[in-house]
Image (cartoon, helix red, strand yellow):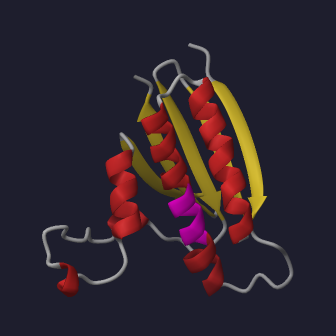
Amino acid sequence: MTIQEHRLRIPALQEKVKEACEFVSRLARAAGMNDDAIHRYYLAIEEICTNIIEHGYSQADYADQQPVIDLVCRQYPDRLSVTILDDAIPFNPLERAEPNPTTALEEREGGGWGIFFVKKYMDRVTYQYAEQRNQLTLEKRIR
């Protein structure tokens, strides 16, 4: 089984998120994913990277260095796997209680909707904290 691996490192800046999204979109297209799957990957990468920048890195002091986000994409014959790595404080977004979509709009609490949709868009989402880094992996099968 041949596995192709591609990596991208971006500074953890909001204006660099689009670069990460386009990187994954190009790989998804090259892997043979349809437009809907590519769009879902784009939205998921945008959501996760934005959350890392706004919530993860905003809580720590990185005055001495520009924090980064790494993406490791692995193309298998049947799926594309994207691992997003960051150095923010450990945080597993999968442990957060899911919002209830049946709750009336005016009664809904903020937060949690992004990861809710990421889990709906992807076939598999996993988290681990290893080597002092958050590692969130998004997988989607190639149909």
Identity of the residue furthest to the top in this view: 1
Percent position (x, y) of residue 120? 32, 50
The residue lying at 63 percent from left, 33 percent from top is: 27
In terms of image quadrants, where is residue 5? top right
Position of residue 60 in the picture relative to residue 125 (left or right): right
Q: Tell me if residue 123 comes above or below residue 135 in the rendering.
A: above
The residue lying at 51 percent from left, 62 percent from top is: 47
Q: Which residues are magenta?
A: 46-52
Percent position (x, y) of residue 130? 58, 56
Q: Tell me if residue 130 comes above or below residue 106 in the rendering.
A: above
The residue lying at 51 percent from left, 18 percent from top is: 77
Position of residue 83 in the picture relative to residue 26 (left or right): left
Residue toward you, 105 or 63: 105
Q: Main secondary structure of the magenta part?
A: helix
In terms of image quadrants, where is residue 114? bottom left
49 within the magenta span: yes
The residue lying at 76 percent from left, 58 percent from top is: 10
Quadrant housing the N terminus: top right
Percent position (x, y) of residue 89? 58, 75
Residue toward you, 25 or 79: 25
Identity of the residue furthest to the right in this view: 64
In this rendering, does residue 136 appear at all? no
